[in-house]
Image (cartoon, rainbow, N blue to C red):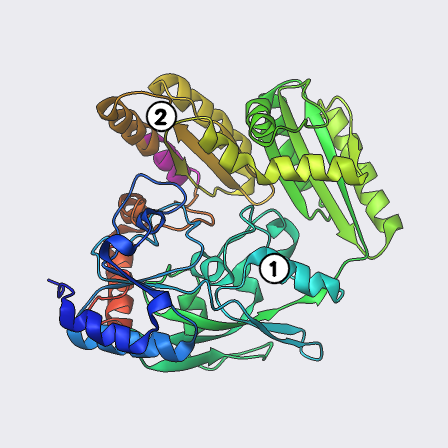
């Protein structure tokens, strides 16, 4: 049992944090009771907007001594309840720790606080002719959140995921102690890699206070191409062939017409083409336009041979905004189209993408749910959404359980995983247990206990 926060605890915390940055009880906005997806709600007893590592350290040391649960939160854009204070207690919000501290051109690194937004970091380095490749759809997420879920995004096909760009971390452990893990070095074979263990741990092991991130020179050219298909089947059948072509693609995105139309309605702006059932969006980048032209010519002809009606270049500013704004709005558009939704964020081997998307349509028909989808077809990470559409709670719970059981079982059958980039949090624990098995879960619990023997940091999440 955790200690319930009382007046003595509040008095101590208020002695650490100025009144404008600490909120108690009903002074806390309901926004902090849930994450982006909703469905799981609980307010913390105390919300603290921290400004520094020192403040986090002092709060954690006190919480550890008193055995008060603590949850760290950034923008709250996660989709699995990972930033919800299930046990009440203290919520530490890092959104005010939003400084870019250093750009090191010699070592090709940028050092940031955890509250820096992804879009702010990308704009900052690109203005200086550098490039931070991880590109998940939610650009208002914090870097701390991206690291905590090992976020991937549209450019993972060519450039990899967040883990591939984290060189070093400063963290506060549950007892309040501060550790520097990793650094600016490119290679490291010095014992167990604690940095990689923290990446993707969803705030259950420590709180990130600073990150040293790898950057690369900005590619000179980038070209996108939109390929329409008469049917969803034709579009997704082209994906394995695109991958097998060995073309150097930055992104391979799959999108269906119903998802595009939802984005049009949500944004109030037209997509360049809405005459066909499905589309593949391809992106190529590099330092030579000649090489890019060779790549996209080969892939475009392959897609036409596979049933693509045409290939549209996303070349003008207007068309770029139209296509990429729509792609970035897919999640919000689907969310706006229904009263409640839940997500199946599976990742499967790339050669099973088409099979899994087809299977999701079979599940939708079998269970009687609307299940729109889109995803990073080039790396096998698919975002499949179950929409409530006004049905009663009992029916919704029965149908979602049946659909999730079927979808995650098929992902396991294909050699896939429960989550590609959104994490486990609270919502997907059952399915992680089924995937990982007792032995692996026991190892994970052992790791958690070493970091957090009193289980005060983000309890009830992941395992």
Can you tell which mark lies on residue 202?
A: none
Residue at far right of view: 290
Q: Residue at x 41, y 44 (%)?
A: 36
As helix, strand or loop, the secondary structure at mark 2 comes to loop
Residue 388 in the magenta stretch? The answer is: no
Quadrant where the image shows the C terminus:
bottom left
Q: Which residue is mark 2?
A: 388
Quadrant where the image shows the N terminus:
bottom left
Q: Earlier in the sequence, mark 1 or mark 2?
A: 1
Q: Decide: marks 1, 2 in contact (CB < 8 A)? A: no
Q: Which residue is mark 1?
A: 120
Residue 38 image-quadrant placement? top left
Measured in 3D between alpha carbons, the distance from the residue under mark 1 to the one under mark 2, in whole angstroms, is 34 Å
Q: Position of residue 427 (x, y in %)?
A: 31, 44
Q: Nearer the viewer, residue 298 or 60?
A: 60
Q: Is residue 251 visible?
A: yes
Q: Residue at x 72, y 29 (%)?
A: 227
Q: Which residues are magenta?
A: 406-414
């Amino acid at each position: 049992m955790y200690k319930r926060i009382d007046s003595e605890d509040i008095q101590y915390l208020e002695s650490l944090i100025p009144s404008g940055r600490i909120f108690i009880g009903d002074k806390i906005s309901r926004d902090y009771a849930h994450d982006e997806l909703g469905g799981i709600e609980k307010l913390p007893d105390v919300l603290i907007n921290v400004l520094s590592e020192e403040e986090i350290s002092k709060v954690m040391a006190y919480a550890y001594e008193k055995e008060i649960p603590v949850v760290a939160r950034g923008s709250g854009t996660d989709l699995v309840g990972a930033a919800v204070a299930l046990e009440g207690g203290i919520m530490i919000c890092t959104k005010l720790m939003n400084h870019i501290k250093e750009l090191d051109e010699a070592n090709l690194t940028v050092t940031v606080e955890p509250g820096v937004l992804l879009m702010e970091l990308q704009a900052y380095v690109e203005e200086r002719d550098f490039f931070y490749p991880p590109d998940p759809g939610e650009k208002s997420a914090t870097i701390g959140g991206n690291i905590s879920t090992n976020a991937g995004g549209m450019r993972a096909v060519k450039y990899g995921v967040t883990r591939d760009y984290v060189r070093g971390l400063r963290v506060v452990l549950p007892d309040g102690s501060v550790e520097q893990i990793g650094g600016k070095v490119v290679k490291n074979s010095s014992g167990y890699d604690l940095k990689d263990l923290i990446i993707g741990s969803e705030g259950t092991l420590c709180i990130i206070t600073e990150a040293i991130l790898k950057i690369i020179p900005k590619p000179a050219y980038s070209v996108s191409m939109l390929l329409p298909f008469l049917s969803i089947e034709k579009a997704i059948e082209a994906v394995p062939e695109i991958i097998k072509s060995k073309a150097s693609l930055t992104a391979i995105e799959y999108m269906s017409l119903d998802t595009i139309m939802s984005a049009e309605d949500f944004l109030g702006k037209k997509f360049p083409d809405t005459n066909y059932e499905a589309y593949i969006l391809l992106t190529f980048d590099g330092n030579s336009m000649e090489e890019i032209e060779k790549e996209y010519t080969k892939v475009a002809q392959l897609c036409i041979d596979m049933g693509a009606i045409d290939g549209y270049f996303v070349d003008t500013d207007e068309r770029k905004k139209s296509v990429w704004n729509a792609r970035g709005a897919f999640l919000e558009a689907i969310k706006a189209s229904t009263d409640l939704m839940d997500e199946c964020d599976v990742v499967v081997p790339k050669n099973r993408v088409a099979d899994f998307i087809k299977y999701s349509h079979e599940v939708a028909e079998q269970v009687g749910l609307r299940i729109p989808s889109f995803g990073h077809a080039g790396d096998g990470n698919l975002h499949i959404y179950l929409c409530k559409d006004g049905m009663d709670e009992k029916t919704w719970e029965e149908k979602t359980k049946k659909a999730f059981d079927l979808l995650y079982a098929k992902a396991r059958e294909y050699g896939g995983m429960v989550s590609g980039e959104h994490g486990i949090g609270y919502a997907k624990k059952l399915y992680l247990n089924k995937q990982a098995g007792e032995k692996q879960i026991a190892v994970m619990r052992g790791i958690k206990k070493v970091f957090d023997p009193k289980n005060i940091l983000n309890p009830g999440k992941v395992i």
